[in-house]
Image (spheres, rainbow, N blue to C red):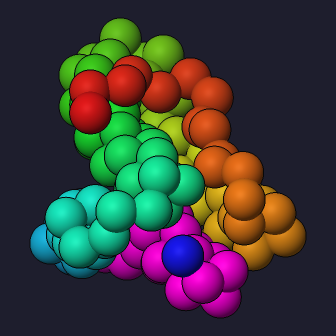
């Protein structure tokens, strides 16, 4: 696959995590996963999907923990992580398009 196309699709998968609507956040990586056969783009799309689902699940758990007060700082940390990690992943795949980015502390469903 063309290196520029690989960069673009991988970056779109990760940066879509900053979009607010759920359809965009998870829809862009699913579209990239279905439309390409490039192994690096497919791994980046799967990582982005897993990151989004993990953030949603952590948000639900931390939201429940708000009643025990410990959830409040955890939610603030989650908001910061959910904002910074897609930016870091996007910069990483643009700098090194041949290596897929792997998020830390996520649950890998796909």
**Residue 18 makes an appearance in the image:** no
Query: Which residue extends farthest left?
Result: 23
Q: Nearer the viewer, residue 93 or 38?
A: 38
Q: What secondary structure is the magenta-colored segment mainly?
A: helix
Q: Is residue 107 left or right of residue 40?
A: left
Q: Is residue 7 left or right of residue 26?
A: right
Q: Is residue 82 above or below residue 70?
A: below
Residue placed at 40% from the left, 54% from the top? Answer: 42
Q: Position of residue 34 (x, y in %)?
A: 19, 64
Q: Nearer the viewer, residue 32 or 104?
A: 32
Residue 49 covered by magenta stretch: no
Residue 14 covered by magenta stretch: yes
Q: Position of residue 45 (x, y in %)?
A: 40, 56
Looking at the rendering, the stretch of residues picked out in magenta corresponds to: 2-20
Q: Is residue 67 above or below residue 38?
A: above
Instruction: Tell how many labels.
Output: 0
């Amino acid at each position: 696959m063309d290196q520029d196309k690989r960069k673009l699709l991988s970056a779109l998968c990760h940066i879509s995590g900053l979009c607010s609507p759920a359809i965009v956040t998870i829809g862009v990586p699913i579209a990239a996963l279905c439309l390409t056969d490039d192994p690096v783009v497919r791994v980046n799309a799967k990582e982005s999907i897993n990151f989004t689902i993990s953030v949603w699940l952590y948000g639900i758990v931390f939201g429940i923990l708000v009643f025990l007060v410990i959830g409040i700082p955890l939610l603030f940390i989650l908001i910061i992580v959910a904002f910074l990690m897609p930016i870091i992943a996007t910069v990483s795949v643009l700098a090194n398009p041949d290596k897929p980015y792997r998020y830390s502390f996520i649950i890998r469903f796909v």
